[in-house]
Image (cartoon, rainbow, N blue to C red):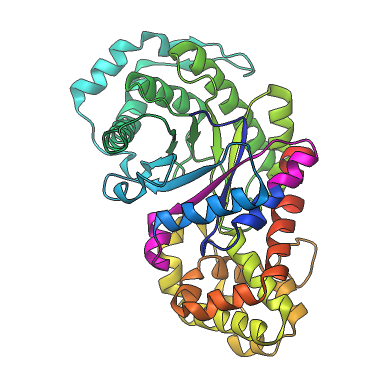
Amino acid sequence: MQLPKFSLGMGDRFAHQAKAQLQACIMAAEAGADITPVWNKSNREHLIIGSEPSQTRAAIDVAVKELGWTKPYFADADHINLKTYERFVAPCDFFTLDVADNIGQKSDENEIAQFVERHPELIGEITIPGIEKPFSLDKAFVEKTAKTFLAAVQEAAAIYKAVVAKKGSEDFVAEISMDETENPQTPPELLIILAAIADEKLPIQTIAPKFTGRFNKGVDYVGNVAQFEKEFREDIATIAYAVKTYGLPANLKLSVHSGSDKFSIYEPIRKSLKDTGAGVHVKTAGTTWLEELIGLAEAGGDALALAKEVYAEAFAHADELCAPYSTVIDIKTENLPTPETVNGWTSEQYVRALRHVEGDPQYNADLRQLLHVGFKVAAKMGNRYIDALEANEEVVARNVTTNLFDRHIKHLFLG
């Protein structure tokens, strides 16, 4: 199973927006960009909402059938590990192997020594097409990098083999995720990681490293854009070099996690892809849930009241909601309006505070991040929330499609 060149990871927390999301991909195709939709939902999100991966798959298949989509599409078992993968085996055909927690775990000294011995080509000066200066790596650096990442790669291999054993086939897309960790992986480290992946005979098609800067949920990139572009281009070159050197899958590409709303780096990504001919996988995840709230607020009346209630509950339980996402949010609590203030807002005020328009003085990035992780509040509402989505389907869907196409696909793939 091959993942096409350009793919977009799309979250659909409550399994009601697959058609609206797919419509954005149809619009992209009409505009000249083939974007493969990949619907992703993690075990953590399923547990919070009380849903099953099979429900996600069913909603996707219905959308594909009703809209007549005949191109590839995937259901992603997002951020799985050996404790969580089993429930995803049957309904999913894309597996994100999350090994960030294994980075830095102690590896067997003999295995590290054997890795270094197997790869004398990693020691010395390495010239990679597309990278201005050669890497100059000594044995100590290779050993240190192996000590940091070898256990993580071995864990990825163990998860992959477990999925194959249950699925009875290798006919799925595998991604390795190393992004939810403290330190970014440099291009020389990425090369060593890819050598280790090749040793394990892992046929991954995407890899999600941690880049320099912060990729907070649902808001723009925080960091040096020029440095990100340099790193992104060097990672592309490193992957291309590793594919040729180690026989990794020819379509192996970078994956940008928490990629939703990273508007300031979309142009550098698009230019890098155009210049190099590389592909990319960008995950937009929880943006769709926020567009549901925007749609409800825009609808007014009872739907707006429900959106205000979601904010009030999220505000009251902020610590609990934020804890699992501490590495990918940065909320300044002093910038959060009180529930009493929000209760007095008009429909337009709520929408403008939440909708990600950087130039709008009413846009509130802190409120947006809190609501991004606040989907648990809506999950606890049960049918009240679902009924509101269904009653206001047209306005909600319009916001979902517009956000995905106008703010994401256009800037990433069309220019």
Residue 260 seen anywhere in this rendered image of the structure: no
Q: Please, is residue 329 above or below residue 295 in the view? A: above
Residue at figure coordinates x 59%, y 56% from the top left = 18
State left or right for residue 72 relative to residue 146.
right
Q: Position of residue 383 (x, y in %)?
A: 49, 78
Q: What stretch is highlighted in magenta?
A: 25-51
Q: Is residue 382 magenta?
A: no
Q: In this view, does 6 lie to the left or right of 320?
A: right
Q: In this view, does 143 lie to the left or right of 94?
A: left
Residue 146 makes an appearance in the image: yes
The residue at 46%/27% (across/down) is: 190
Numbered circles on residues, count: 0
The x, y position of residue 337, in whole percent, is 63, 81
Looking at the image, which is closer to me, 96 or 208?
96
Rendered location of residue 241, percent (x, y) = 53, 16
Q: In which quarter of the image is residue 169?
A: top left
Q: Is residue 33 one of those drawn in magenta?
A: yes
Q: Residue at x 23, y 36 (%)?
A: 106
Task: Give residue 98's position: percent from left, percent from top.
Answer: 38, 43
Taking depth in this image into account, of 164 and 312 the one nearest to the observer is: 164
Q: Relative to 394, say whether 311 is above or below.
A: below
Left or right, residue 263 beside residue 379: right
Above or below, comparing residue 38 to residue 148 in the picture: below
The quarter of the picture where the C terminus appears is top right
For the point 61% across and 59% down, the residue is 287
